Image: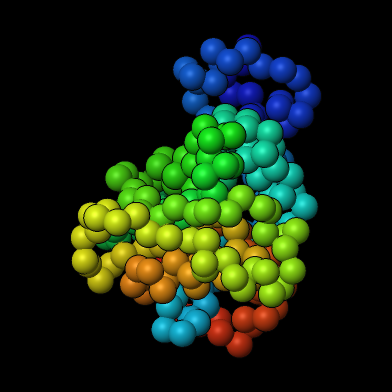
Amino acid sequence: MDESTCKICLEKEQDIPISFFLDDEVIVCKKCLERFRVHKKTYRIHNVNYHILYEYDTWIEGLFFQFKEQRDIVLKDIFLYAEKDFLKKKLKSFDCIALCSGEEKRALRGFEPVLEIFKEVKEPIASPFYRTDSIKQSSLSKEQRKQIHCSLKKKICYPIRNRSRQLLLDDVITTGQTIKAALLLISCRDVLVLAAHPLWIEEHADDQIKHSFWK
Ligand SMILES: [Zn+2]
C-alpha cells in the first residue's frame, strides 16, 4: 500500500489493515484538506479569548463521528494535519489543559478524543476534569445543557501549575456551556477549540477581536 495514501478518503473506500496505521506517516490529500472550513478567528467573551480553528460543518461532523463514535483512532492526526507546525510553535508558551468525555464514553472508546488530537502538537497536556454525564449534548434541551456544569468535575489533588499562560483545549463548541463550566473550575484566559458551530459563531459575531494567536 502506498504510504502517501490519504487517510480520510481511503477510509471511506476500503478497509486498511491495522498494522498500516502504526507505522506510516499521516497524509491528508489536498482535496480533503480543502474541505476543512478554516476559521482562525478569536473571540473575547467575559475576558477569555476563544481561538477557533474551524467552522463546524457536515464535513467535520462526519470526521468527528467516525473518529469519536466509530472509534476510528487513525483519524486523530487528520484534524491538525495542516496546522501541526504552526500549533507546535504557538502552544510552546502555554500550559495546556484538555476537556474530557463522560466516563461511559471514555470506557467505550478507550481513548480521550481531545488528548489524542492535540498530543501531536503539545505534550504534556493536563487532564484534570471528569464528567458524570454521557449523553450527547445535541440531544439535550437548552435547559439541560445549562445543567452540564453539574456533571463536569475537577479531580481532587490534580496538580496544575498556576501559570497565567494556561490554554484550555476542546474539540467542538456548540453552546459553550461545557467550556464555561470548565472555566469556573480552572482559571484560563485562553481557549483553543477545533471547531465552532455556526450558530455559536453567529451569536458571538460582536465578540470577535483582533488577536495575535492566529498570526
Ligand atoms: Zn483525501
Residue shown at 65%/68% (left/top)?
Answer: 145
Q: Is residue 102 visible?
A: yes
Quadrant of the image containing the C terminus? bottom left
161 relative position to 21: left or right: left
Q: Which percent across, then down, holds residue 46?
A: 46, 85
Q: Is residue 117 visible?
A: no
Quadrant of the image containing the N terminus? top right
In the image, residue 151 above or below residue 35: below
In the image, residue 175 above or below residue 104: below
Residue shown at 75%/19% (left/top)?
Answer: 14
Q: Which percent across, then down, holds residue 40?
A: 55, 65
Q: Quadrant of residue 38?
A: bottom right
In the image, residue 188 above or below residue 8: below
Number of callouts? 0
- Tell me the colour scheme of the image: rainbow
Q: Which percent across, then down, holds residue 181?
A: 48, 70
- In this rendered view, identify the residue nearer to me: 150 or 3: 150
Residue shown at 57%/42% (left/top)?
Answer: 104
145 relative position to 164: left or right: right
